[in-house]
Structure formats: C-alpha cells, structure tokens
Amino acid sequence: MPDMTYTYNPLLIKARGKDQMRFEMGDTYVDGGAATSALADEEYENILYALKPERKAWLYAKLYVLEAIMFKLSYQVDTKIDPLTYALGQRAAQWQALYDKIRAQILASVGLPSMDAKAMCKDPYFFTGMQENARVQVRYNPYQPFRRMVT
C-alpha cells in the first residue's frame, strides 16, 4: 500500500478542491500525518473526483467526507489510564453534529420545488374570468359562493 500524503495549503481554500474541503471540515492540522488528520489527501481527492460545479454537489461531497471521517473514527473509544484520559467520543460527537447540520441543509434544498426556466417564459395558463359561467344569473351580490343556475 502506498504511503498516504497529508498536505494543506491555506492559499487554495477559495479553489474548489481538497484544501477548501479540509478548511471547511476543520481538518487543517496535517503536520502529524494520520495521527492528526481525519483523512488523507488521496481520500479527499477521490471523493471530490467527479464533483460538479454546483452548490448541491459540494454539499453532497461534504456529506460523503463526513461519513468517511465518522466511519474512520467509529472504532475509537474513550480511554482512561490513571490520571490520563482520552475522550475520543467527543470528537465523534462534533463530527456527528456537523454531519446532521449538512444533512439538514441538503434535505431543505431538495424539498424546495423550482420552476423550469422554459415554463417561466410562457403565457400564464390561468386568467381572470376563466371559471365564469355565462349561464349563471347573479341576483344580489356577485360574490355569493353559491349561485342559482338559470334554467
């Protein structure tokens, strides 16, 4: 298995790629390699490989990155050895909260209907007076909900 690389360049956080994803995930401390980074460069790049330039695609990629991080950290447990304590579950809880937040954003964006651009250019289907009946006789108030039909 080839050695994994762990790099981060803060000057590239505006360009859509691994450095921006590392920045948004908070996975920027790469000096310790696998001990301090959630994922390797190759893992980020494989997730972002077929990324489309739209916002939803970036949110889905963030969700996949978080899933990979959570699966990777799921085997780590809290450990206490005399005065020394490792609370690794807190880290997983933070990633889970971020996962839930991004998942809610995706579900909110999927649930909103959008109008087709071609349909916006057409004349409206409905118009004023569309449901008027010429055979109806209005005796008192023209806004009565139930009118008598002329026989």
Image: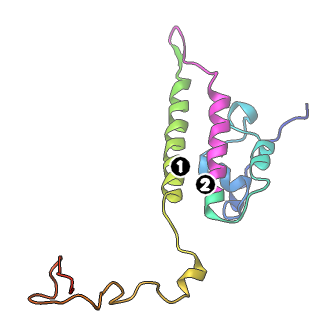
* Residue ID for mark 2: 59
Please state the horizontal and vertical placement of residue 135, each as a whole percent of the image.
Answer: 26, 89
Residue at point 51%, 59% (across, down): 109
User: On screen, 20 above or below 70?
Assistant: below
Please state the horizontal and vertical placement of residue 51, each as a whole percent of the image.
Answer: 74, 58
Q: Which residues are magenta?
A: 58-83
Res. 102 mark: 1
Q: Residues within 10 Å of mark 1 (few under 14, many from 20)?
A: some
Among the 4 quarters of the image, the one containing residue 33: top right
User: On screen, 30 above or below 77?
Assistant: below
* Outermost top residue: 82
Question: For residue 84: magenta?
Answer: no
Quadrant of the rendering where the C terminus is positioned: bottom left
CB under 8 Å between callouts 1 and 2?
Answer: yes
In the displayed structure, does residue 4 sit left or right of residue 14? right
Q: CA distance from mark 1 to mark 2?
A: 7 Å
Q: Residues within 10 Å of mark 2 (few under 14, many from 20)?
A: some
Residue at point 17%, 76% (across, down): 146
Nearer to me, 123 or 38 = 123
Q: Please tell me whether mark 1 sits on a helix, a strand or a loop.
A: helix
Nearer to me, 103 or 140 = 140
